[in-house]
Amino acid sequence: MAGYNQITLLGNTGNDAEMQFTPDGKPVAKFPLAVSKKKDGEAQWFTITVWDRLAEVCSEHLRKGQQVLVVGRVELDQWTGADSVPRSRLAVTANTVTFLGAKSGRLGQDGEPEPAGADSPPF
């Protein structure tokens, strides 16, 4: 049976999206996303990665503290720290990012607005 890997997160950005480029010139941007736990108010932090045109749009328009809805896939990052201790974290590669608030809009992987009702979240 084939697996299915999708996560939907609603939260606030911890910083502006930071744009970088791969050695072959492909745009990639990352930003931290805080998702609050309902009971204790603590936040769970995720590192969000976006690629190509969506990376460019997020880098241009996404600001610290902005509320966004992210839909993507979860990946496990593993590395060994400088202290030789193995470390890991969950990271999310976004397929869509919806900017919420006065200037809201859902952006697909190509960074272009998606038509209303296209693949709408279940809430």
Image (spheres, grey):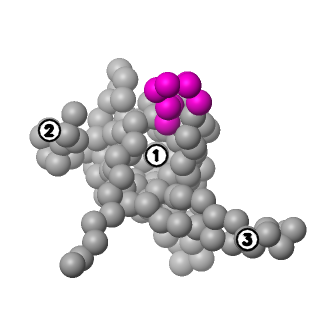
- Check contact, mark 3 vs mark 1: CB within 8 A: no
Which residue position holds label 1? 58
- Marks 2 and 1, how far apart in space? 20 Å
Query: What type is the residue that disc 2 sits on?
Result: Ala
Closest to the camera, between mark 3 and mark 2, is 3
Q: In front here: 79 or 33?
A: 79
Asked whether residue 39 is drawn in magenta, I would say yes
Residue at image point 46% right, 46% down: 58
Quadrant (top left, top right, bottom left, bottom right) of the C terminus: top left
Which residue position holds label 2? 116
Magenta range is 35-42
Which residue position holds label 3? 86
Asked whether residue 106 is drawn in magenta, I would say no
Relative to 105, residue 4 above or below: below
Residue at image point 40% right, 36% down: 10
Q: Which secondary structure type mostly characterizes the magenta part of the structure?
A: loop
Disc 3 element: strand
Disc 1 element: helix
- Check contact, mark 3 vs mark 2: CB within 8 A: no
Relative to 120, residue 7 above or below: below
Please state if 40 lies on the left or on the right of 110 as rendered.
right
Residue at image point 49% right, 36% down: 35
The crowding category of the residue bearing disc 3, from other C-alpha atoms within 10 Å (few below 14, some 14 to 19, many at least 20), is few
Residue 27, visible in the rendered structure: no
Closest to the camera, between mark 3 and mark 1, is 3
Please state if 70 lies on the left or on the right of 92 as rendered.
left
